Amino acid sequence: MRALVARAVGGPLLVEEVELPAPGPGEVRVAIRAAGVCHSDLSMVNGTLAPPYPLVLGHEAAGVVVEAGADVGRVAPGAHVVLNWAPPCRQCWYCGHGEPWLCERAGSPAAARGRTSTGEPLHVTLGLGALADEVVVPQDAVIPVPAELPFDAAALLGCAVLTGVGAVRRTARVAAGDSVAVIGLGGVGLSVVSAARAAGADPVLAVDVSPAKAELAGAAGATDFLLADDSLGKAIRARTGGRGVDHALECVGRGATIRTAWRATRRGGQVTVVGMGAKDDVVGLSALDIFHSARTLRSSVYGSSDPDRDVPELARAVLDGALDLAPLITDRTGLDGAAAAFDRMARGEGARTVVLP
């Protein structure tokens, strides 16, 4: 089968022939029908993270179960599924305390699985490696969805939409009438914009360094688009009675933009970090500022979501027309075009590219 493989930090991304093992007990083989190109995958190759190589990229995907190993009772061949890159164990302390998104056994950067065509041990991103023709994964890493759900929409439910909607609904708990600023308008950021607007937030201020994101922000439901420049703080205060927003959601994962979100938020407001950053990118806040501002700073891991519960709920919302994912998908390509999609994402162009193998 074919897969998009990274072999070194900053190296070229190449479509290669690879070999996966047959499904073992409790495992399934899934034919990938759509996969999103996510910034977390870029982190695997730009030095933000340090996974082992060679590495099959991709973790946001949907497909069809084509084979099931022994003792699989969750799905049968023919089932349409969304892949879950962080299936909770349901046994650790965090799972037992209602926080499965913090499961201590889920979400490792890479797992050993399969071999390259030359026999090298192969690794797969977040246990999936979904930018490929097929994956072999534990049955708990697949979530059944209705067959009528389009594959491109289903793929986004596995990461961008679950993360963005969850950050609004479950982490920040944005309420009707709250003012919201969303910083960074990739696939996750636009999902945050859409979810904030659906929650009744007003205004919803969408912020990005690229003027080209203005149209995408409007389509997702933003009331205003603001450039991330030196006038940003003044522009936000002008739209919020001089105070700043009730909620700032940072969807970039950089120290500088977290500071921007902090300054954009009113006293007593909430800053939610949705983007994943580098371990050596330090955020500095003065002790006096923390005390005087009375702001809350927290992160949203995987949207504080339980994928087994929330993905089917989001799928129903898409089918009912309550959740429109069309503004999130700006490009579609085959597997041979996936490397170029990573280049566009690194330049900040568009929202989500969906790969249709």
Image (cartoon, grey):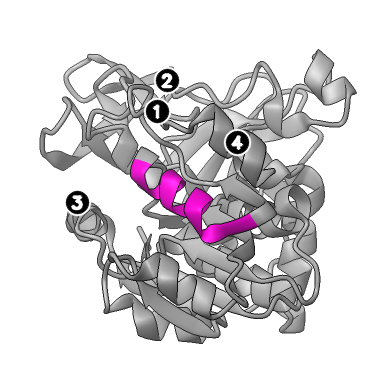
Please, what is the three-letter code of the amino acid marked with disc 1?
A: Val
Density class for disc 3 (Cα within 10 Å; few <14, some 14-19, many ≥20) is some
The numbered mark at residue 290 is 4
- Name the residue that disc number 3 marks: 339
Secondary structure state at the residue bearing disc 3? helix
Seen at 60% across and 49% down, the residue is 271
Residue range in magenta is 256-266
Residue 344, quarter of picture: bottom left
Secondary structure state at the residue bearing disc 2? strand
Are discs 4 and 1 less than 8 Å apart at CB? no
- Name the residue that disc number 2 marks: 113
Question: In the shown orientation, is residue 145 left or right of residue 325?
Answer: right
Quadrant position of the C terminus in the picture: bottom left
Q: Position of residue 231 (x, y in %)?
A: 33, 70
* Foreground tag (2 vs 1): 1
- Name the residue that disc number 1 marks: 124
Seen at 45% across and 38% down, the residue is 276
